[in-house]
Image (tube, rainbow, N blue to C red):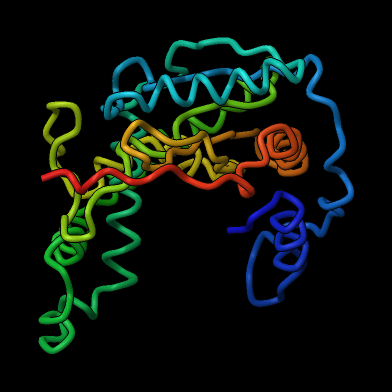
Amino acid sequence: MARCIGDIARLLQVQAGENPAMPFPAPVEPWADRLGSSMNGRRIAWAGDWGGAYAMEPRILSLCEQALRVFEDLGAIIEPVAPPFPAADLWQAWVTLRGFLNAHGKRDLLEDPARRALTKPETLWEIQQGLAVTAEALHAASALRSRWYATAADLFTRDDALALPSAQVWPFPAEWRWPEVIAGRPMDTYHRWMEVVIPASLAGLPALALPAGFGVNGLPMGLQLIGRSGADAQILAMGQQYDAATDWPARRPPPVSPPRP
């Protein structure tokens, strides 16, 4: 959401603080003043495609690994890790909770004929799926989320960050409804192609998306740096060191190849 880490830190400082109308406020911290820490000895766990669970278009993983070498040059320790939690369980918890919340927050889009006519089919499908969620399924999804949160907390006792690609596909033509096949693997729902964001979002972990570079097609890709709950300052500081070493905002992108058919 910003061209530099300092601006992100200042944005968080503006957004944080107590709001009487909202529960669980994030305390205001001087994130912008904590960006100078060294990368020496920092440990980054590289989860790649989550043991093959997340379909990736060609060259995304290699580009992200190239970006991780920048952290290594800065003194960090990069370690490939096995999937710390079953991807199927993360997916089940996320899709259940998401469907339930969307169904009850956007139900009027389904029930109001005028608004329904203006709503895309994927949204209507998700509302209908969410309305069918039972109390038992909701509890099971919540329990899975809690188990993943605890597992991630344990992972962060050994590692300072968990790294993943920020996307599973290169930017695709605007005319596409959504990527229906990735690397030969059919996507069974309209949000399966963004499954790589679930580990951070399901547990509410701080995640920083960093530019990883450009593919041979001239299209950009990013790298997620995920931290333990409350470690926003540490993740921002790690991102700051990477940003200073790469200066991606000052680089001009290469020519973009013609859109894929």
Q: Report the residue at 33% width, 29% height from top.
A: 89
Outermost residue toward the front?
A: 255
Indicate left or right for 78 with 65 as reference. right
From the top left corner, tell me how far across and down residue 43 is, in percent.
69, 17
Does 43 appear above or below 250? above
Number of on-image labels = 0
Task: Specify the quadrant of the image occupied by residue 181.
Answer: top left
Q: What residue is rendered at 71% in x and 59% in y?
A: 12
Q: Is 92 situated left or right of 223 in this image?
A: left
Seen from the viewer's position, the closer of residues 24 and 236 is: 236
Q: Residue at x 86, y 32 (%)?
A: 37
What is the quadrant of residue 118 in the picture? bottom left
Residue 261 is situated, as x and y percent measured from the top left of the image, at: 10, 45
Residue 236: image location, x then y, percent: 72, 42
Judge left or right: residue 204 versus residue 143.
right
Residue 87 placement: quadrant: top left
Quarter of the N terminus within the rendering = bottom right
- Location of residue 186 in the rendering, given as x and y in whole percent from the top left corner: 11, 34
Q: Would residue 90 appear left or right of 70 to someone viewing this image?
A: left
Question: Looking at the image, is 126 positioned above or below residue 149?
Answer: below
Front-most of residues 92 and 143:
92
Q: Is residue 243 above or below residue 87?
A: below
Residue placed at 10% from the left, 81% from the top? 117
